[in-house]
Amino acid sequence: MNYNKDITGYENEEEFASYLNGKKVGRVYPSFLELLYKLYGWLDYDDCIECWVNKSKRKADIYIKINGYVRGISIKKGIKNSVHSESVGSVVYFFRSLGIDEKIIRMFLSYQYADGTINGTGKTRISSSLYRETHQAEIEEINKALNNEKYINSFVNRFVLQGNKSEYEVDAVIYGVVEEFIWITKEEIYYIMRKHLKDNISSLHISLLTLQPMSRNLNYNPKYEMCRNQVQVKWYNLADNIIEIMAFHRKPYSNSRKSNDIITI
């Protein structure tokens, strides 16, 4: 399955909102119906849906409102999905608030800049692959420190579900386009991140999330220099991990009720 088509991420969000807005619950594709029941509980087929694109920079790309209740949804498509970006200074402040050791923070900064410094002022920059060749032991020490059960919920909240600019977590992440998509709820995200917390991954990571600079700017292009100060968090195998949840941890969907059953939320 492709879960993709030749439109931008913003156009994709608009298509989801346009498809859902103004429809009755019983008139949506079965894939949407299953998601709505998961987010709201039982709904009447005649319940009306309101949906709109979130114009502010928050984790939720669209909001769905039914019977006065609003759910926030993040939407992804394509490959190598970026789920978060934040200034390295803000990430360091966050690490310190969790009690991450200063030695680990210095190693993390050294990895971020890969120029022999912890502030990006070094004269010689190297690629991430070359950095791993000479500093793999340090990366493994960072990974051991960050992939700790006591931190994982905070990391998931910060990097996937809520971020550092919103008051609320998203309720689900959709992967795909209106015609073909899969989804994962926030509870399932917390679960799968804990499940894969001890996976052996050579890159700098927190469970299934990879942390890297937005750009190492190895050619010293002034246009991209600020990207060196941005930490980018990617969920590379998002679709595979959603399918894993669907196959092994989600109860089969069954719509056995009558269409006139009204469920109180």
Image: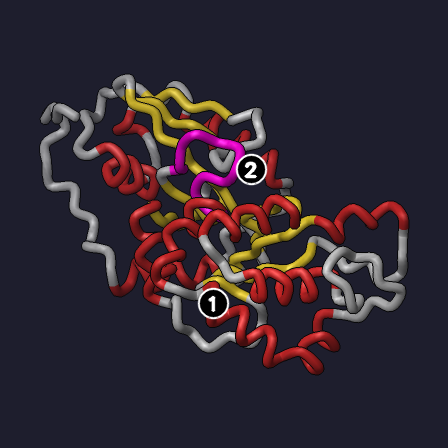
Q: Nearer the viewer, residue 14 or 150?
A: 150
Residue topped by disc 2: 12
SS assignment at label 2? helix
For the record, the magenta segment spans: 159-170
Which percent across, then down, holds residue 236?
A: 54, 61
Q: Does 160 lie within the magenta span?
A: yes
Which percent across, then down, holds residue 62?
A: 47, 30
Q: Amino acid at mark 2?
A: Asn
Q: Amino acid at mark 1?
A: Ala
Q: Does 192 lie within the magenta span?
A: no
Determine contact: label 2, label 1, CB under 8 Å. no
Mark 2 and mark 1: Cα distance apart in space: 37 Å
Q: Quadrant of residue 129?
A: bottom right
Q: Is residue 146 left or right of residue 86?
A: left
Which percent across, then down, holds residue 84?
A: 56, 47
- The disc label shown at residue 145, or none: 1
**Does residue 1 appear in the picture of this structure?**
no
Which percent across, then down, holds residue 151?
A: 40, 56
